[in-house]
Image: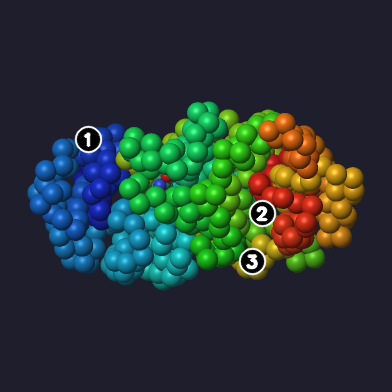
Amino acid sequence: MPQDQPPLQVALLGCGTVGSAVARLITEHGDDLAARIGRRIELAGIAVRRPQRARSLPGVPAELITGDADELVRRPGIDLVIEVIGGIEPARGLILAAMANGASVVTANKVLLAEDAGSLFAAAEEYGVDLYFEAAVAGAIPIVRPLRESLVGDEISTVIGIVNGTTNYILDKMDTVGSGFAETLAEAQELGFAEADPTADVDGFDAAAKAAILSSLAFHSRVRSADVHREGIAEVTSADIASAREMGCVVKMLAICELTDEPEPRVSARVHPAMIPLSHPLASVGDAYNAVFVETRSAGRLMFYGQGAGGAPTASAVLGDVVTVARNRVRGALGPGESNYASRGIAAMGDVVTRYHIRLEVADTPGVLATIAQCFARHGVSLQTVRQQTLAETAGGEKQLAEAQLVLVTHQATDQALQATVDTLRGLSEVAEVSSVMRVEGN
Ligand code: HSE
């Protein structure tokens, strides 16, 4: 190792759960990191909003803490800036200033990347620096680099991920314990698996940002959070989960990124709960774990699995990027820039082809099944399976109108046709209730 070279100077922005783990790893594993890079790296400063609090963090060098992030990123001689603050501003301004100062950037900021990756990549290009972001999607799991580098010679058709640990934990507990959404969420909050404000996770914002990043990389096109169709898990009921079980499925919150069919392939990115067969590789991903399933033309099916959050696991992904960027610096090289040459348009959710599971409570009288079947036929939706169960024929000894429960699973159709079918079903006098509607994926 060239010992005569001065250490690379690293600035850390943010010292929360991930930042403090990063600071500790850089400090404690300096010798190994230096051997892997070919030069030492040195923490030049750690910028935080509340310096007083950060100074007492164990393993974090108190003398490096500063409240002045603007000064730190503009300081002469900074080679690498690690941004783990999150959010749009001040993170974006700080990253752009760091790049203008000649520093490469490692960030875990999914919200910013899914909103404005274009300006970050443009600045990286302009100033000849690196932009790495492995930790922005699925924590410790290597998925950004596989899409950006390992699989870049292949043709990716689908990326389906469980990319939010909180919602996976809640759905998994609803499935295994049999409890409802609200009580499972409350328990998850008590145990620290869900945030006090769970909106970003439960309503799918977090997963949508990750889906935007994954789609951009997989399909060489710019995809932003706003382009991702988003439905959360708050409406998932114990009855949906039970219905999934009866079909040999499990309910998962999925991020689905795919290309729609010719003549003009478009990017479809969506996050929503869906039933997937127990035989699907993603079905066995339990607790707060994440996994990403990728299908490509040549490599076939690949599965990436691991911890999607947490200080140490996410810091592992950050450190991997730090070593890579530092190696690039030592060799005077640069990693890949933005690849958006395909510039695919975004598919409307209505045009996306999927399948529905629908459960109805209907009057058990002659002709009802035919009426329901006609409703599907009128919308051009083909039925795959129909299951009927009689619910009640008498109550209090008196003969009542018999009710039946119908569980229908469709063949593939456009989401628009499926939605229209459900809307029509809701208006039929024969239908007492449409008690569960959920997409079925992964066949
Ligand atoms: N809150 C996220 C999750 C982790 O539950 O997976 C950070 O993206």
Tell me which amino acid carries mark 3. Ile
Q: Tell me the residue at 45%/43% (across/down).
A: 182
Q: Which of 12 and 3 is in front in this view?
A: 12
222 relative to 366 in the view: left or right: left
The disc placed on residue 28 is 1
**Mark 2 vs 3: CB contact within 8 A:** no
Q: Name the residue under label 2.
A: 258
Residue 98: percent from the left, percent from the top?
A: 29, 64
In terms of secondary structure, where does tag 3 sit? Answer: loop
Nearest-to-viewer mark from 2 and 1? 2
- Which quarter shows the C terminus? top right
How much space separates mark 2 and mark 1, taking CA atoms? 42 Å
Earlier sequence position, callout 3 versus callout 1: 1
Earlier sequence position, callout 2 versus callout 3: 2
Residue extending furthest top?
176
Q: Tell me the residue at 83%/51% (across/down).
A: 372
Tell me which amino acid carries mark 2. Glu
